[in-house]
Image: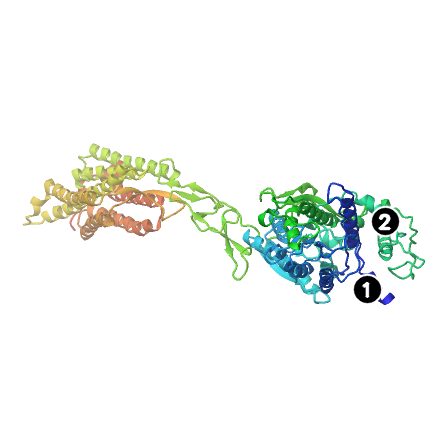
Amino acid sequence: MQEQQEPLLIRFSLVYYLQLQTLIHTLEEINKDPNILSNITLGFQMYDTCNMPHYELQGALQFLTETTTFSSNSWCNTRPSFSAVIGSTVSANSIILAHVLGVLRYPQISPVSSVSLLSNQKMFPSFFRTVLSDKFQSLGLAQLVLSFGWTWIGLVATDNDYGLLGIQPIKEEIIKAGACVAFTEYIRLGQPNRNAPQIVNAIKESSAKVVVVFCFETDFYPIANEMLKQNITGRIFIANAGWSRSILLSTRKYFQILFGTLGLASEDYVVPGLSQFLSKIHPSESMGENWLNLYWEKVFSCKFLYGKNLTGSLETPVKECTGEESLDDVRSSSTYISSLKYCYFIYLSVNALAKALEDLKSCKEGEGPFSHGTCADIWKFKPWQLTHYVRKAIFTITAYSIVNWQLSPEGTVKQICIGNYSTIATPDQAMNINSSLLLWPMGGQQVPRSVCSESCPPGFRKAARQGQPVCCFDCVQCLQGEISNQTDSITCIRCPWDQWPNPERSRCLPKSMEFLSYDDALGKTLTTISIISSLIPALILRLFILYRQTPIVKATNYSLSCLLLMSLCLCFLCSLVFIGYPHHQKCLLRQVLFGLAFTLCVSSILAKTIMVVFAFMATRPGSNLRKWTSPQVSYMIIFTCFLLQFILCITWLSVASPFPQYNTKTNPEIFIVECNEGSPIAFWTMLSYLFLLATISFIVAFLARKLPDRFNEAQFITFSMLAFLSVWVSFIPASLSAQGKYTVAMEIFAILASSWALVICMFLPKCFIILFRPDKNHRQLIIKNKE
């Protein structure tokens, strides 16, 4: 007898016993109520299956074949003695029962079987439940995880229908929301250690700080022990209803690894009158004596020492059960309260069945739900007829509590309700959380982060890591000219053509304009130099006019010198056209004015050089070149050279005239407002023509440098043309390497430098003699004596 009872005693469950008492209490309340099923007494047959599938099936077949002889009903007739089945509490077992009972359409109401597969009415047409499908719980767990911004999540589940069907919707919702699964591990129920070492190693090695665990408390128990063994802390576990209010794990032993755990739990509902009913239970009752003794020892943590001890040996001192213990002493304990967590679902199941029977009994002929308005006979109804009424009477709890595992001031672990999740509310209102009540593993109320990669700030984009989930990425700064104005941007967007990113590359700003302005320090400097420089030729011209009768002024060809000085004034002043905003008119005139002014200047020097040579050659005996030394010839040379440049400029303006433009290629960060020369060929042809005139002047002057005059003009022309050419030859590579306003500044510098070269080389020696050495301003000293 003892060997047969031992397995039963080891498996005694306070939770299941209280559920049985709830069923008895609910039936008694219904039978006392004159307003429901009057003259009918509801009874029950109980079969202890120990949650074993073959026992579940054996019990169902026993009911169906009427092999049992026990019945608490006082009514006996030819129909089966039972109307419906309430059970099982295990989803896998409920599936087995539903397949069998569904063939005959016997109604089956399970209080807590939540696997989503049972929602398939085609497969299980007579199965009902008062607890929500795991599908809703899974969606709630996924929404709970996503509501805290976690994107890198680990998943753990049992490898049966309950775990597999529960974890899959969570995984799908997480991925659909853009988050990622770091790992998925399964609790192998067929292995003694439940695969705990491998699961804990996956948790330990992963960077995910959040782990969703979908299982029962007994399945997670080995995992918790292995985590203690490896000292794994700092993880946030998300618990399903199977262990979110676990008594087994709610101890100080596991607090260091489970502190801060979040989970969904069934709402706390009180069964009316159950507390008073349980207060009347006493070991002295004869019905179910062994169970009552076990219940008493479990609730009050004591032992019956005289022949009634069923739960252990007496080797260690224990508290003796007297039978005088009061339920009031333990009613508020967490163990007792947790044991009542599924009682309300039993209460709902029994009441749903009673209401279905009442509806069937109250049916009026002609208004019934069956063929031709018929009703079912309360004494001879078919199982499928009762199933019809159960489907209308069943009531399902539609909300979950959200609990947070915390340490109470008394030092015990409690699951504090911090919010709720409604399955019938709109998605944006389904979950309500009071964040002020939350505590996290590391302490405090700051939400921990669980991400594979930190968010990319504005100015960066996400670059996926090859072979890794989308949540694992590198942050790459946007390319030049692009921005990202949001966190975790996938792509960067290019700024409009007239805008450019700020230094952080988070927004586009209007581009600044760059041109050589009069307000710039460089522009002011060049303007000042140009104006002052233009006064120097004017002063020299004034000096030449005052001393026009002196030999040194006459020797330099007074009229050509005056024309040259005026052209040099224009050369200095034409640089001003290059400064300031390049309007259309400015672009049209500046290169033309520059070209014509310098053409006039260089052609005057060329004419002066040729006239020097002609004048020397005309002094030879028998020379016929005297007629070529007249001023008209020099003017004709100047006019011809100037006319050719003028025609070139007019043609340039007519065919491809310069125009202002925004240059964004040189420096894309700014607008370089510049003049497009229209035709580069025309521009360089103009410069080449100037170069040609200067080269001819240089060659002619160089050949005439040894003329016998003491004051030889050709020597000064040679040096001036050499300096002039050097400046403009240097300008070509310098202008090509400069950018923006500095290109314009480089050309102005070349204009000023070449003009100053002419002024210094051509006129500085003459001015020095006129002003400081008047004793040398005599004809005898200017013309060399023949040796």
Q: Position of residue 617 (x, y in %)?
A: 11, 49
**Residue 746 visible in the snapshot:** yes
Instruction: Identify the disc placed on residue 765.
Output: none
- In the rendered view, tell whether residue 326 sits above or below residue 164: above
CB atoms at circles 2 and 1 under 8 Å apart? no
> Which amino acid lies under the numbered mark 2 shown in the image of this protein?
Ile
Q: Nearer the viewer, residue 209 or 690?
A: 209
Mark 1, other Cα within 10 Å: few <14 / some 14–19 / many ≥20: few
| Left or right: 281 in relation to 631 | right
Q: Nearer the viewer, residue 324 or 705?
A: 324
Q: Secondary structure at mark 2?
A: loop
The alpha-carbon separation of the residues under discs 2 and 1 comes to: 24 Å
Give the farthest residue toward the right. Answer: 306
Which residue is label 1 attached to?
7
Q: In the image, which is nearer the foreground, mark 2 or mark 1?
A: 2
Check the image and tell me how it is coloured.
rainbow
Q: Quadrant of the N terminus?
A: bottom right
Q: Earlier in the sequence, mark 2 or mark 1?
A: 1
- In the rendered view, tell whether residue 117 sits above or below residue 347: below
**Residue 782 visible in the snapshot:** no
| Left or right: 560 in relation to 398 | left
In the picture, residue 227 is in which quadrant?
bottom right
| Left or right: 633 in relation to 71 | left
The residue drawn where x is 75% and y is 44% is 38
Q: Secondary structure at mark 1?
A: helix
Q: Position of residue 373 (x, y in %)?
A: 59, 46
| Left or right: 140 in relation to 688 | right
Mark 2, other Cα within 10 Å: few <14 / some 14–19 / many ≥20: some
Q: Position of residue 693 (x, y in %)?
A: 19, 48
Which residue is label 2 attached to?
281
> Which amino acid lies under the numbered mark 1 shown in the image of this protein?
Pro
The residue drawn where x is 21% and y is 35% is 544
